[in-house]
Image: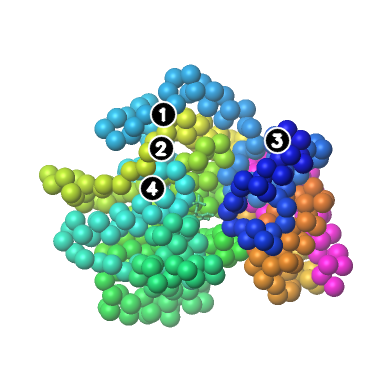
Amino acid sequence: MIEQELLEDDAQYIWHPLTQHKTAMVPKAIASAAGNYLYDFQGKPYFDAISSWYTCSYGHTNEVLTDAIKKQVDKLHHVVFAGMTHEPATVLAKKLIGILPYNQAKVFYSENGSTSVEIAVKMAFQYHFNRGEKRHVIIALENGFHGDTFGAMSVSGLSVYNGPFEDLLMEVLRIPAPTSDNIESLLAQVVDILKENKVAAFIYEPLVQGAAAMQLNDATALCQLLRIFKLNGVLNIADEVMTGFGKTGTLFASDQILNKPDIMCLSKALTGGIMPMAITSTTQEVYDAFYKDELAAGFFHGHTYSGNPLGCAVASAAIDLLVSPYIQQQIDRIANSHENIVGSFKAHKNVAAVRTRGIILAIDIDTTMERYGNMRNVIFNWFWERGVFLRPLGNTIYIVPPFTTTSAELDMLYDTMFCFLDCDILT
Ligand SMILES: Cc1ncc(COP(=O)(O)O)c(C=O)c1O
């Protein structure tokens, strides 16, 4: 298909996500992708600096992952997962439980980050219900993002575009992200909230709030917060949809926090960007609250594609890659490289702040702008024309490169970002 025809069909038939079609730019037509690059119809490469929304961490069309899916294709594509089971699902579950924080015992399959959160929230409410307690309030972090379905949207603090739904959302109380500076007052605030409300769960993005432009939270302070909730019977839900699978330098961000979550949400890099798939994992204690003689005490939630064998097979292969010495060294190398460059970015006259955690690097430009305004498009296009795909968030430019990024490619990314900071767009 030629590019022009593709764009015409796109304009005629497609409604894109997160898009005001009346004012949006014409979408970029992607012909193919391989390794760390996307290719347009003229064969021009674009470095995928955000791993296609943090999914393709092992590079596009990774051979190991492609082989895993090819092998599974000849055996079993899909089968109902209620009342049936299969090897790819059990192999993956066992592998995941082997690498997740020690207290995680069970995995529940679904298809995307939002549903993994939706499931976690429903599990938390029903956990208390099954134990004879009616708890209906959730605590979440300010500026958190957890997805676009109703439950996930309710707990998300970044609700700029949720206006039409606001009256329909669940009861959620928001607290600031914990830091070493605010933790004492935050703990006092939480104690007050717990006195006055029947809190079912606390949901948090550990260490890095992705959609909040990669805002960091403090592991020690967060740990104190988790402890208070635990002591008060509130379930802690770690949304690791973005941070999971190596992004923060450890397999999971929760590995860097002493108090472990009761429930975890995982998706994105789970399958290395090949199949849409998600996991909600829980402790044995959470699972046991549903394990009763009464049918209705079970968790009656299910999606048609739950536990899809192709997704499970490719996720298993992705986990083997993640724990391999090569990928672990790559993660350390990228994280160290980011640490070493932070000072130079901080010293730049057009930079207001710089943050890094693991392979994530975010730079706040010293200017104010709308999150999805015109300036955002100007910056997006500036990088695109120079062969780099990234998506600015407000005045933040950030990268979450594939683990397969080389030192030369990192240098190219840093150089392009410095070049941008010097360019006349910002003057
Ligand atoms: C932390 C977090 N949770 C949930 C989601 C929603 O995931 P999905 O877009 O797969 O529904 C996202 C998406 O960016 C996310 O970053």
| Distance from Cα at disc 4 to Cα at disc 3 | 31 Å
Q: Residue at x 40, y 37 (%)?
A: 305
Structural crowding at the residue carrying mark 1, measured as other residues with C-alpha within 10 Å and reported as few (<14), some (14–19) or many (≥20) = some
Residues at badges 2 and 3 in contact (C-beta under 8 Å)? no
Q: Which of marks 4 and 1 is nearer the N terminus?
A: 1
Residue bearing mark 1: 78
Q: Residue 305 carries which label?
A: 2
Q: Is residue 18 visible?
A: yes
Locate residue 62 relative to residue 347 in the image: left or right: left
In front of the other: label 4 or label 1? 1
* Residue drawn at the location 70% of the way across and 72% of the way down: 369
Which residue position is annotated with label 4? 280
Per the model, the C-alpha gap separating discs 1 and 3 is 26 Å
Please identify, in this view, whether the residue under mark 2 or under mark 4 is nearer the observer: 2
Q: Which mark is residue 55?
A: none
Residue with the most extreme right position = 424
Q: Does the magenta stretch include residue 410?
A: yes
Q: What element carries label 4?
A: strand
Q: What stretch is highlighted in magenta?
A: 399-427
Q: Name the residue under label 3.
A: 32
Residue 92 seen from this side: no
**Looking at this view, is 83 or 247 the one in front?**
83
- Amino acid at dot 3: Ser
How far is the residue under mark 4 from the one under mark 1? 20 Å
**Which quadrant of the structure image shows residue 404?**
top right
